[in-house]
Image (tube, rainbow, N blue to C red):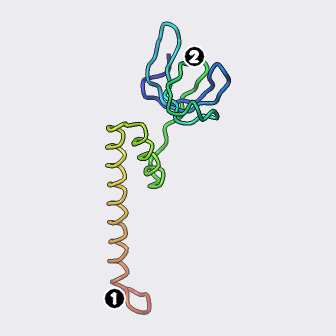
Amino acid sequence: MKFNTSDWVQGKTKDGELIHGFIETIDILQGIVTVNVVKSDNEERVGHIVAVRASWIKRVPDTALEDAQLVQNLIDLALATWDEAWFMELTESLKSKELAASEADAQSRVYLALRNRLGKSA
């Protein structure tokens, strides 16, 4: 089977409902995975665990966490799903991005301070 616990997946339930969530458990023998539904076209499914056949879902590719807004949205999702380890990982990622941005901003201010009023280096 190509899935692991905590992989993000999307697919359909036996009732044809679209689901997006992460894998809670995997039954290799029967080919069934349980998915904690985070998003669905049936709002009643959100927040519940649904058992689906592994062939009915596909893995969502990992995304690079380059955008600070995306990281903040994922932090909200980690809070909503009570995933403390993921929350801590995302928070550290956001802190390092903010630190890198502030250092880059400080470097640009130093560079601007060395220029005279005509825009040329002193």
The part of the image, by quadrant, that contains residue 112 is bottom left
Q: Disc 2 residue type?
A: Arg
| Camera-side residue of 71 and 76 | 76
Structural distance between the alpha carbons of marks 1 and 2: 69 Å
Q: Is residue 68 left or right of residue 87?
A: right
Q: Position of residue 97 (x, y in %)?
A: 37, 56
Which quarter of the figure is the C terminus placed in? Answer: bottom left
Which of marks 2 and 1 precedes in the sequence? 2
Return the residue nearer the eye: 69 or 80: 80
Vertical arrangement, residue 71 with respect to residue 41, above or below = below
Element type at marker 1? loop
State the image coordinates of residue 100 (x, y, percent, origin top left). 34, 60
Residue where numbered disc 1 is placed: 122
- Point out the residue furthest to the right here: 16
What residue sits 35% from the left and 49% below the top? Answer: 93
Pointer 2 residue: 53
Q: Nearer the viewer, mark 1 or mark 2?
A: 2
Image location of residue 40, percent across then percent down: 60, 34
Looking at this rendering, what residue extends furthest in the bottom direction? Answer: 117
